[in-house]
Amino acid sequence: MQIGIVGLPVSGKSTLFQTITKTHFDQFQLAKSEAHHAVIKVPDERLNKLTEIFKPQKKTNTSIEFVDVVGLQKGDSNSAQFTGNFLSTVKTNDALIQVVHLFENESVPHPSGSIDMMRDINTFETEFILSDLGILEKRIESLHKQIQKLHDDHLKHELALLKKCAEILQEEKPLREVEFSKEEYFILKNYQLLTIKPMLIALNLDENHTSGVEKFLDVLVRTKVGKNTKVIYFFGEIELEMSDLDNADAKDFMSEYGIKESALDSIIREAYNLLGLQSFFTVGEDECRAWTIRKGMNVQEAAGVIHSDFYNKFIRAEVTHYNDFITHGSFAKAKEHGAWLLEGKEYIVEDGDIISVRHG
Ligand SMILES: Nc1nc2c(ncn2[C@@H]2O[C@H](COP(=O)(O)OP(=O)(O)OP(=O)(O)O)[C@@H](O)[C@H]2O)c(=O)[nH]1
Ligand SMILES: [Mg+2]
């Protein structure tokens, strides 16, 4: 899974990127015009606990790749200028985090001269909408021409869909809020549209906001947050300072500032929600591992994520939920209590299942 961090100039994108990836940029890296990539391990207390119990040789978390997307032109940000470089880096992400500049910092004033959450979010949305409209209109034109020659039903169907999307965008509505069928998504995927991507709005606050955050959230939730959009907030500067501390010190630091959840934790939680993801585990003496899959996948599909052979030669799967395993203390005890089950391929995996695949 790849998540792109986007936003207007000096909103705190690189600050957030460094915080969640525990990296530190020097001036040279900050000025670089390419995107920065980093893969982070998704922290999971349950995996830690399983590792304590099984003492495997290896522990493997699932991972998320974050991209600090650069390429927005600095200076006049009344209208953000999307360069080709920016667009090509954004297009490939599964979801986007939009950072919004709400911190007051005299040495880093907001490029537009004032702090205004709704203005910034709307500016950004408008640019995304215009970019998508540009792509769709070009394709609609060429489809018209093709259909005149070919009279192909698939193309007609596609044309109707693209026209519907263009109309929605013209009403200034992002496509992520629209309910599409599976087939429609499949067609639209080819166009790598921006407004169809799930969006996490991340409000970058300063220490004066540690109480009263609700004020910002209320406004947003009432006016802006439709389907496939979530809002989180973080304290860019404070959390960057904190990112070097070990867990215990970081907890103290957070409670000192009244910060309830770190940026990384809230981003992972909401990104999983937005993308409809969940984790399951495999355990053993050689490795304890967390795997990420989409909600609704059956156990044969989940087995295929581990290895394609497990999918092809799937027989059954032993399934015990993490909570039951912890409650009963072992698979044998879980089995006595009916919490260890042998499931067929139709079984729908639940978040936290511990799975062992039996295959041919
Ligand atoms: N006081 C304060 N300063 C912040 C905060 N977040 C970022 N800054 C400062 O704002 C400046 C810009 O932050 P960056 O993270 O580089 O912003 P960016 O969005 O990556 O900027 P560009 O990539 O240049 O568009 C830096 O000097 C940060 O130290 C914050 O929460 N509080
Ligand atoms: Mg930056």
Image (cartoon, rainbow, N blue to C red):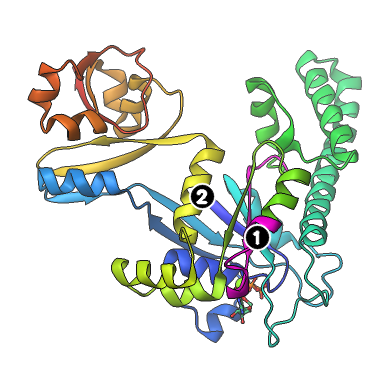
Give the x, y percent position of residue 112. 83, 74
- Which element type, helix, strand or loop, lies under badge 1? strand
Disc 2 or disc 1, which is closer to the eye?
1
Q: Which mark is residue 77?
A: none
- Image quarter for ligand 1 equals bottom right
Q: Amino acid at mark 1?
A: Val
Give the x, y percent position of residue 122. 81, 54
284 and 101: which one is in front? 101
Residue designated by label 1:
6
Give the x, y percent position of residue 310. 27, 24
Give the quadrant of residue 341. top left
Q: Are marks 2 and 1 in contact (CB under 8 Å)?
A: no
How far apart marks 2 and 1 lie (CA) works out to: 13 Å
Q: Callout 2 environment at 10 Å: few (<14), some (14 to 19), or many (20+)?
A: some
Q: Is 36 above or below relative to 282? A: below
The outermost residue toward the front is 211
Split into 4 quadrants, where in the image is the C terminus? top left
Q: Residue at x 52, y 39 (%)?
A: 273
* 8 relative position to 329: left or right: right
Give the x, y percent position of residue 221. 71, 46
Q: Is 138 above or below relative to 249? A: above
Does mark 1 have its CB less than 8 Å from ligand 1? no
Residue designated by label 2:
2
Is residue 23 something one can see in this rendering?
no
Q: Is 170 above or below relative to 40? A: above
Q: Amino acid at mark 2?
A: Gln
Q: Residue at x 86, y 29 (%)?
A: 163
The magenta region covers 194-215
Number of marks present in the image shown: 2
Give the quadrant of residue 299. top left
Does mark 2 have its CB less than 8 Å from ligand 2? no
Give the quadrant of residue 174. top right
